[in-house]
Structure formats: C-alpha cells, structure tokens
Image (tube, rainbow, N blue to C red):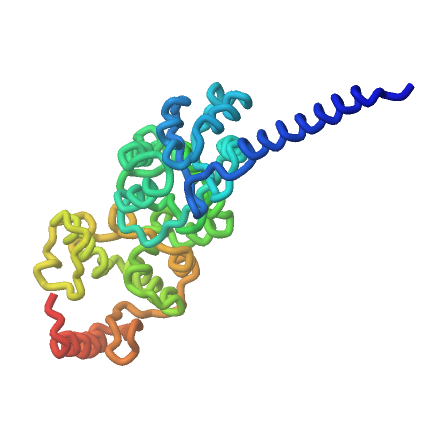
Amino acid sequence: MTLSAKTKKILYALVALGILILGVLWFKFFTNNTQSKDEFYVTIPTGSDYQQVQKILKPYVKNWSDFEFIAKLRKYPEHVKSGKFVFKNGMSAFEQVSSLRKNVPVKLAFNNQERLENLVERLSAQIEPDTTKLLQSFRDSVFLKKNGFTKENVLAMFLPNSYEFYWNTSAQKFRDKMLEEYKKFWTKERVEKAQKLGLTPTEVITLASIVHKESVKKDERPKIAKVYLNRMEQGMPLQADPTVIYAVKQKTNDFNQVIKRVLPQYLQTNSPYNTYNNLGLPPGPIAMPDVDAIDAVLNPDNNDYIYFCASTERFGYHDFASTYEQHQVNAKKYYDWLNRSGISK
C-alpha cells in the first residue's frame, strides 16, 4: 500500500516539526547555562532546602527557568544534597543538575600546626564544620577518656598528611577518621619500639614535637632525639628551648610572636611546658611533628651526648657534647655569634 502525496507531506511536516522541537529543547536545556568562564565550586550547607539552593546558585545560572525545569523534571527539589559541587563554563542546565548529585571530595593537607586552635582554623577553611564544632569534637571528654587522650595531648592524634574528605563531613566523622589513621600508623613494630624506650605513643609524639622544633635537618634528628632520651634516662630535666618558647607564647597568649633567643627570664616562666623547671615531658605536643621526627625518636642515634647547641659554622645543624665543659665552649661560640648578629630576643 502506497502513501498518498498528501499523507507524505503530513509525515514530512511532522518529522520536520519533531526535529525542530528537539533542536529547540537541545538549545534550551543542553547548551551553556553557566555564568562563568572558569571552573569553580559551589557548596551546599547541610540541611539546605531547594529555596536555599536557589539563592546559592542564581548568580551562576544564566537562565533560571531552564535550570528549574530540568531540576523539577529530575526531582532535585525533593532530593537536595549537601556538599561541594563543581560547575564549569559551558555546562547546560541538564549538566548543572547532574553535577549537584555528585559530591566532590576535598583534599585536605595539614602540618606544622602548633596548637589544636591552629589546626581547626585550617580545617574550617576547607570543610563545612566551623572551629567551634571541631574543637568541641576533638575535646569531647567521653571521646578523650575512651581513647586515652587528654585535652593537652590530643593533638598527637593528628598526623600530618594528605587526606580526602567530603566538604560536608561532620566534625565527629572527621575526628573518628583521624583516630582510625592514628591507629593505622601505630603498627605493632612502632608500638614495640616505643615500649622499649619506656614511652607511650602520645609521649613519643610529644618528644618528637620537641625534636621537630629543634631541627629541620632530618639526618640530625635521631641524634637530637637520643640526647633527650639520654637526659631522661639519667633523670635530668629535658631543658628544651622549644618548650620554653611555647610556654612564653602560651603565657602571653601570643603565638604569633617570633622568639629567636631564649632569654634568662624566659627560663623562669611558670608553666608545665617549661622543661627547665619541670622534670619529664610536657603535658602534650608543642607542635604537630612530621613522621620523620616521630621515627627519629623511635629509631634514635647511638650516642652518649647530653648537650647540644646551634652550630655557628653549619647553618641549621648543632654541635654536640658529652660533658658540660665542652658544651660551655660550644655555647659561648653560639652566644657570641648571636651578639655579633644583633639578635637580642
């Protein structure tokens, strides 16, 4: 059976109309609907509803009615997800809605934080929980007691590294993940080495924080670690300058001050962190030591040194001594250099 000329014309017209409609729909919903020339991220806070999402997205969406049509078609208003989402130049309304279903992980990196307060400031700039929520979570008394930490030493739980989290990760989930990483780090071998030294993992990290502050030279850290272990074995105070500097900063509530020279009056600072006046380790880490410093404590050098001071000939290194007399000679060289350099505080 052949189609009449009239029927053919109608079919051709319908096909053409269909193609035209598809073209319009494609142009309307599958072409660029993004107000940006670059890739960028939008964050949707936890608990947000569709109205709040509208306020967040409107500056970045060219044609809101197109976005809204696709969003409702795909039931996005009923299933808003919190998190961090990528928007790119050229994204269509369809791609925008699709992107809002794909939470993008955040790469977190932190190191060299002196205090928990410094750490939470850095974290709150990268994930959703604010500093208050993070601090409350990290210092939660039930959590601390259950896992053998104190408010003073819980910084030891955070190992400097790169991690991946979703932006909307809660403070508790972040904390629990850090505890998991901490337990992974403390392998059976590391725990046994700590036990041979007569130290707990948190005590190792506390001592490592001092070693970390004493020297940036990785090859020298095992030697410095052994000096402090030698002092502890002999019942001597650690007399670690970095702990005095920490005590002064804490006492004056000014952790931004730069102290290049430990003055005699600093040694009298009344603080549990002052290891000139207190025997043993301070209550907790004075910084976040890197893994190299931790392993330096667990694998110390074999020496009988009791003293050391900064070298005036090898920048960044130290001169070591087994006797107080030799140390006095080394120390005089260093203090003479400080005076010549005009470093008075």
Image quarter hosting the C terminus = bottom left
Counting labels gives 0
Instruction: Give the image location of residue 192, x and y in percent.
Output: 47, 50
Residue that lies at the very extreme toward the right in this rendered image: 1
- Residue 111: image x %, image y %? 36, 52
Image quarter (top left, top right, bottom left or bottom right) of the N terminus: top right
- Give the x, y percent position of residue 77: 46, 21
The answer to whether residue 154 shows anywhere in this view is no
Asked which quadrant contains residue 20, the reply is top right
In this view, the residue farthest toward the front is 5
Residue 320 as seen in the image, left or right of residue 5: left
> What's the residue at 50%, 34% (across, down)?
96
Which residue is at the front of the view, 261 or 71? 71
Residue at position x 35%, y 46% from top? 156
Residue 196: x %, y % from top left: 43, 53
Residue visible at 27% across and 80% down in the picture: 313
Q: Is residue 326 above or below residue 141?
A: below
In this view, the residue in front, 192 or 82, is 82
Would you identify the image quadrant in which residue 30 lies?
top right
In the image shown, does 273 or 24 lie closer to the viewer? 24
Which residue appears at 50% of the width and 23% of the height? 69
Horizontally, residue 187 falls left or right of residue 145, namely right
| Looking at the image, residue 140 lies above or below residue 239 | above
Above/below status of 280 relative to 91? below
Q: Is residue 73 above or below residue 58?
A: above
Can residue 185 be seen here? The reply is: yes
